[in-house]
Image (spheres, coloured by chain):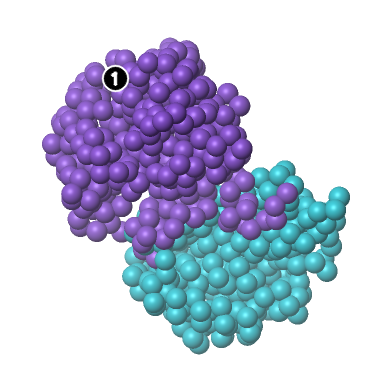
């Protein structure tokens, strides 16, 4: 067990931070449309060319891929890093552009559905690939920080053989889907918490910083505990790849996300309510990711039922 | 970052578990064991001796005091496996983890020779005389005074919520040697519990027959030679001692183990189909896992000899949350069976109620997280 990054991990994290400083962050997200962004093909290209979207292809470096996904999310990248770096490797196929992942039984609105080169449907009877016809998939405005499209329409209009991908286990895909969302939630939570801590340290009322009031301190301290628990469980799940670990990480991350979203806005007051302030760029994403997590099936029940079969 | 165990650590755990599975008798109910109860004190005494024989009582101590160079991870494994089985060492885990090391670091040769061998053999109980009626979380406000009279101190005052005082042979006592100072005027005195002027009165508590006491000190005479560290330097001595233990007992391990046992009972009785129950259990399990990973992060720091940080407080907060979540889940799983005092759920309810108070309250931990981890401004 080692909680510090080794030399390779340091190098990866530094390089991804550099890419995100240059090509990500709140300013870039605003260029792309703010809480209603279009897909960042430019960032996808930079991360892809440097190999960071393919890190998860070697099972031995799934943890490194998780660190990348968390960093990209923390720096507000509008790309499919979670799917690409953590879920795609379980499918055994190569796809260069963005992908979307949806439940096979009731595909609905989904992240990247209108941008995806390939749509992955996950059902108990198999995992299938759909190649949507470019420009035929309706976009849907969600204002939850991600480009959203209608996956049902994409599948109806798409070109697919109907046969499941051979040798691909739906449960394994769900496991990595959960890990990907857990990592993305952690990144967004850290971003929201960081901004809120900075705000309450500077904002003065009653002659002192509001962050010096114990009510605010204790609320944020509980948020920090929730975020750190979710963070290390997400990394551990990526390290082990175990279904129970993935479900557990998400079981911790989901209530943590709800808590952070609520408290970050509460302590940011009316400022956090304005779109000119950056907070909503990360907090609205927390809502979208939580909705998506629920479409995989309850992680709590999955955790209980994998732990006690 | 990686989460695997070394071969040595995995072997250490396997050997320890094999010993515990064989050694712990049927009458030792790990789920419901109460540390320091009369019934268990005798057993703990014998058990600690057996651990000592296998070099598992003080494995992390230096060779010269009988240790066996165990790594911080092995010490953590020891704590995890023993605490989760109801801590059969009884109160002796405190001796091994911080009272002994504190005497090693600050004691005179005479003090080390007198106090360390019995701890190493597992045949002595210590209590810690810290809290007072008006000094709990604000420990530096303690008022028990020790006035120098020749080569003795005359001690007057009282201590409260002192665990194991009724079965202990020694007390690690904090007293004020300078009435004017606050933190600066405190000294540590190593007191024999059978000294004249020391009276122990048990307090009944909701945790059951756990020995929980008030200690009254009336003209108690303590030789100056029994002072640990310099006069007025007690605060630094105790802070150093407790820094090691700031993360506290691995409460998550015991909570997780008995959640597991409760679920297995429910499964055996065909009572685990209700999704509401599964929900409560899944949440409790996840809370234990979050506490575990944050606890391991503290052990990792210790193993790397990084000075204790706010990570210990993060872990403590998560452990309290885990204890509480497990208590909710066990009550839900047990149903009316929880009305039995001897049921696991009934015990867990009580234990979880102490989790946020003992050894630094939940609120104090949150203060530390906000100041040291989040760097929020002081009020």
Residue at x 57%, y 72% (from the top left corner): A72
- Colour in which the image shows chain B: purple
Callout 1 environment at 10 Å: few (<14), some (14 to 19), or many (20+)? some
Q: Position of residue A170 (x, y in %)?
A: 42, 58
> Residue B209 location, x and y as percent?
40, 15
Residue A227 figure quarter: bottom right
Residue B215 percent across, percent down from the top left = 46, 19
Q: Up-down: is B68 above or below B193?
A: below
| In the image, residue A21 above or below residue A191 | below
Name the chain letter of the residue that bears numbered label 1. B
Residue identified by numbered label 1: B40
Chain shaded cyan? A
* Residue depicted at x 27% and y 30%: B89
Q: Which of B361 and A269 is in front in this view?
A: B361
- Looking at the rendering, in which quadrant would you find the N terminus of chain B? bottom left
Question: Most extreme residue toward the left, as rendered?
Answer: B53
Q: In this view, does A30 lie to the left or right of A24?
A: right
Give the residue displayed 34% in from the left and 35% down from the top. Answer: B225
A263 relative to A125 in the view: left or right: right
One can see residue B181 in this view? yes
Q: Which of B368 and A280 is in front in this view?
A: B368
Q: Position of residue B172 (x, y in %)?
A: 39, 32
Q: Is residue B315 visible?
A: no
- Depth check: give the residue in front, B318 or B262: B318
């Amino acid at each position: 067990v080692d909680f510090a990054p080794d030399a390779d991990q340091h190098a990866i994290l530094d390089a991804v931070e550099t890419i995100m400083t240059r090509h990500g962050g709140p300013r870039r997200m605003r260029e792309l449309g703010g809480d209603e962004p279009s897909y960042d093909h430019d960032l996808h290209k930079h991360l892809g060319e440097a190999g960071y979207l393919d890190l998860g292809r070697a099972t031995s470096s799934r943890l490194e891929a998780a660190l990348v996904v968390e960093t990209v999310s923390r720096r507000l990248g509008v790309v499919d890093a979670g799917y690409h770096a953590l879920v795609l490797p379980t499918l055994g196929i190569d796809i260069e552009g963005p992908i979307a992942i949806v439940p096979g039984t009731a595909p609905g609105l989904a992240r990247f559905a209108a941008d995806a080169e390939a749509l992955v449907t996950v059902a108990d009877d198999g995992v299938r690939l759909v190649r949507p016809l470019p420009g035929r998939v309706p976009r849907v405005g969600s204002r939850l920080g991600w480009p959203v499209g209608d996956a049902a329409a994409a599948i109806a209009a798409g070109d697919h053989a109907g046969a499941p991908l051979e040798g691909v286990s739906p449960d394994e895909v769900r496991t990595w889907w959960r890990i990907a969302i857990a990592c993305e939630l952690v990144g967004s939570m850290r971003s929201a918490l960081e901004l809120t801590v900075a705000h309450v340290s500077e904002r003065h009322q009653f002659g002192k910083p509001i962050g010096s009031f114990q009510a605010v301190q204790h609320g944020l301290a509980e948020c920090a505990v929730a975020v750190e628990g979710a963070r290390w469980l997400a990394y551990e799940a990526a390290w082990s790849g175990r279904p129970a670990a993935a479900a557990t990480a998400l079981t911790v991350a989901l209530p943590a996300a709800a808590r952070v979203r609520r408290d970050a806005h509460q302590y940011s007051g009316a400022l956090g309510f304005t779109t000119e302030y950056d907070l909503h760029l990360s907090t609205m994403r927390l809502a979208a990711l939580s909705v998506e997590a629920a479409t995989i099936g309850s992680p709590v029940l999955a955790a209980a039922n994998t732990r006690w079969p | 970052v990686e989460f695997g165990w070394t071969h040595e650590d995995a072997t250490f755990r396997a050997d320890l578990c094999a010993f515990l599975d064989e050694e712990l008798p049927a009458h030792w109910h790990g789920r419901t064991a109460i540390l320091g109860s009369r019934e268990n004190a005798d057993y703990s005494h014998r058990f600690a001796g057996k651990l000592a024989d296998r070099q598992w009582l003080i494995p992390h101590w230096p060779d010269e005091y009988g240790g066996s160079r165990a790594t911080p991870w092995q010490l953590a494994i020891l704590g995890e496996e023993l605490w989760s089985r109801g801590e059969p060492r009884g109160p002796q885990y405190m001796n091994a983890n911080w009272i002994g090391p504190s005497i090693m670091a600050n004691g005179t040769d005479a003090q080390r020779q007198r106090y360390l061998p019995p701890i190493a053999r597992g045949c002595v109980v210590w209590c810690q005389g810290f809290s007072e009626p008006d000094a709990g979380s604000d420990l530096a406000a303690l008022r028990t005074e020790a006035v120098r009279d020749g080569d003795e101190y005359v001690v007057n005052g009282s201590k409260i919520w002192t665990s194991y005082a009724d079965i202990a042979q020694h007390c690690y006592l904090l007293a004020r040697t300078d009435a004017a100072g606050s933190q600066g005027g405190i000294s540590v005195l190593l007191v024999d519990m059978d000294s004249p002027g020391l009276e122990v009165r048990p307090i009944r508590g909701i945790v059951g027959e756990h020995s929980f006491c008030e200690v009254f000190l009336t003209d108690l005479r303590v030789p100056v030679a029994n002072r640990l560290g310099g006069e007025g330097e007690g605060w630094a001595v105790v802070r150093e001692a407790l820094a090691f233990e700031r993360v506290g007992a691995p409460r998550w391990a015991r909570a997780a183990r008995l959640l597991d046992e409760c679920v297995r009972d429910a499964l055996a009785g065909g009572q685990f189909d209700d999704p509401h129950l599964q929900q409560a259990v899944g949440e409790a399990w996840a809370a234990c896992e979050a506490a575990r990973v944050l606890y391991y992060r503290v052990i990792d720091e210790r193993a790397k000899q990084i000075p204790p940080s706010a990570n210990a407080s993060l872990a403590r907060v998560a452990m309290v949350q885990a204890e509480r979540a497990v208590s909710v889940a066990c009550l839900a799983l047990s149903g009316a069976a929880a009305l039995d005092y001897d049921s696991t759920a009934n015990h867990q309810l009580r234990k979880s109620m102490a989790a946020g108070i003992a050894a630094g309250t939940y609120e104090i931990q949150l203060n530390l997280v906000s100041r040291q981890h989040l760097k929020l401004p002081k009020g």
